[in-house]
């Protein structure tokens, strides 16, 4: 295990990150690129650790619609099976000649009852079938009420709608160098009073043990009043920076991970929104700078923001006056 004994003695640590200090108990990165903690919970049942509300709210759109559709088909399949087991003779108005046709008729009767459409051609006869039909109608009302609530919650949920660059870079900055990443709003929402907090997680050796240390990175600009275009987050690498005098190999040995948290106010929802990500040592490009991603329109009447250029950068020479090296 090749670990640096110390980073920068003048760099202050942050003990409020919420992560433990024992690095040997961690596997992989701390924060995934999508902003979620890289943690897999055990010691509890699958349904015990799963919040269906959060799962369905955060699920991707097509996957959510597929889940609702499959749930609808599955519930009706269950009720159709119950009607079939009770006996299709208790469903009046059926026009079926084979077993398959009987089950199909029972299934579509279930779908009509579940949705409370009730065309009337097929009707339940007998107490047991009528009870099942009544219970299914009640279940259908609950199902569509929940589905409608989920659709509304997904539609109205405040989100930051920010994208982070795939890579961070070490680029020339003023007379020295700086660590940089870039964010951009990609929807037509309006964010104001944005604030960013960046921490560098380092794995160091103390008393023969591998421990986590978290160092806040001072940003050139940690707050902006509004975000309409891209924002390049810059941490100057000076003699007070925990990245001072560290090469790419040093960051690799220290299992470095830069955690970025952006918080802002969404005017439409009048609510605070948060977005986060992290960059591991292999996602930091030394000697590169981001290319401009917005420009004036041809008629000069507006500004064009090219969101697809978020990850565009070019290689450049680092300032030699600042002790930062890609190797």
Image (cartoon, grey):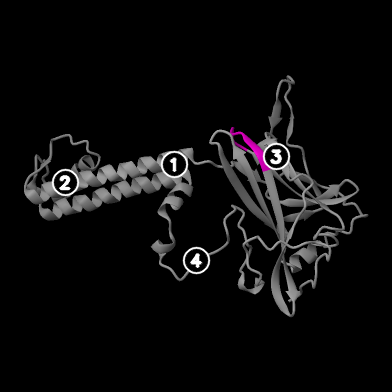
219 vs 63, nearest the viewer = 219
Q: Earlier in the sequence, mark 2 or mark 1?
A: 2
Residue 101 in sight: no
Residue located 13% across and 36% down the image? 121
How far apart marks 2 and 4 lie (CA) works out to 41 Å
Q: Earlier in the sequence, mark 2 or mark 4?
A: 4
Does the magenta-highlighted stretch encompass residue 26? no
Position of residue 322 measured from the top left corner of the image (x, y, whole percent): 90, 55
Question: Which numbered mark, 2 or 1, is in the foreground of this view?
Answer: 1
Residue 319 located left or right of residue 81:
right
70 vs 251, nearest the viewer = 251
Q: Tell me: residue 318, above or below residue 257.
A: above
Q: Secondary structure at mark 2?
A: helix
Find the magenta span and give its range. 186-194
Which residue matches tag 2?
133
In the picture, the quarter occupied by the N terminus is: bottom right
Position of residue 256 measured from the top left corner of the image (x, y, whole percent): 72, 63
Q: Which mark is residue 153?
A: 1
How far apart marks 3 and 2 lie (CA) works out to 57 Å
How far apart marks 2 and 1 lie (CA) works out to 30 Å
């Amino acid at each position: 295990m090749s670990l640096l004994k110390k980073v920068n003695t003048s760099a202050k640590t942050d003990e409020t990150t919420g992560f433990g200090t024992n690095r040997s108990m961690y596997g992989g990165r701390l924060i995934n690129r999508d902003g979620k903690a890289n943690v897999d919970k055990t010691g509890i049942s699958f349904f015990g650790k799963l919040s269906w509300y959060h799962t369905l709210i955060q699920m991707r759109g097509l996957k959510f619609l597929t889940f609702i559709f499959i749930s609808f088909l599955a519930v009706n399949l269950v009720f159709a099976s119950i009607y079939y087991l009770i006996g299709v003779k208790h469903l009046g108005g059926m026009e079926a000649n084979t077993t398959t046709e009987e089950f199909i008729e029972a299934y579509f009767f279930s779908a009509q009852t579940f949705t409370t459409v009730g065309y009337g051609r097929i009707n339940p006869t007998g107490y047991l079938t009528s009870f099942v039909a009544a219970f299914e109608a009640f279940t259908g009302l609950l199902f569509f009420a929940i589905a409608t609530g989920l659709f509304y919650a997904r539609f109205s949920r405040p989100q930051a709608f920010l994208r982070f660059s795939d890579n961070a870079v070490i680029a020339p900055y003023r007379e020295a160098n700086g660590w940089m990443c870039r964010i951009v709003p990609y929807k037509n929402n309006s964010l104001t009073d944005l604030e960013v907090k960046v921490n560098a997680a380092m794995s160091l050796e103390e008393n023969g043990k591998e421990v986590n240390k978290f160092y806040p990175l001072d940003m050139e600009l940690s707050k902006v009043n509004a975000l309409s275009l891209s924002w390049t987050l810059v941490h100057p690498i000076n003699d007070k920076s925990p990245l001072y005098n560290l090469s790419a190999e040093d960051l690799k040995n220290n299992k470095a991970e830069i955690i970025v948290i952006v918080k802002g106010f969404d005017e439409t929802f009048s609510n605070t929104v948060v977005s986060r990500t992290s960059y591991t040592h292999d996602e930091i490009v030394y000697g590169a700078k981001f290319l401009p991603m917005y420009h004036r329109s041809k008629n000069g009447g507006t500004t064009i923001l090219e969101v697809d250029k978020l990850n565009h950068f070019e290689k450049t020479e680092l300032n030699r006056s600042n002790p930062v090296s890609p190797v």
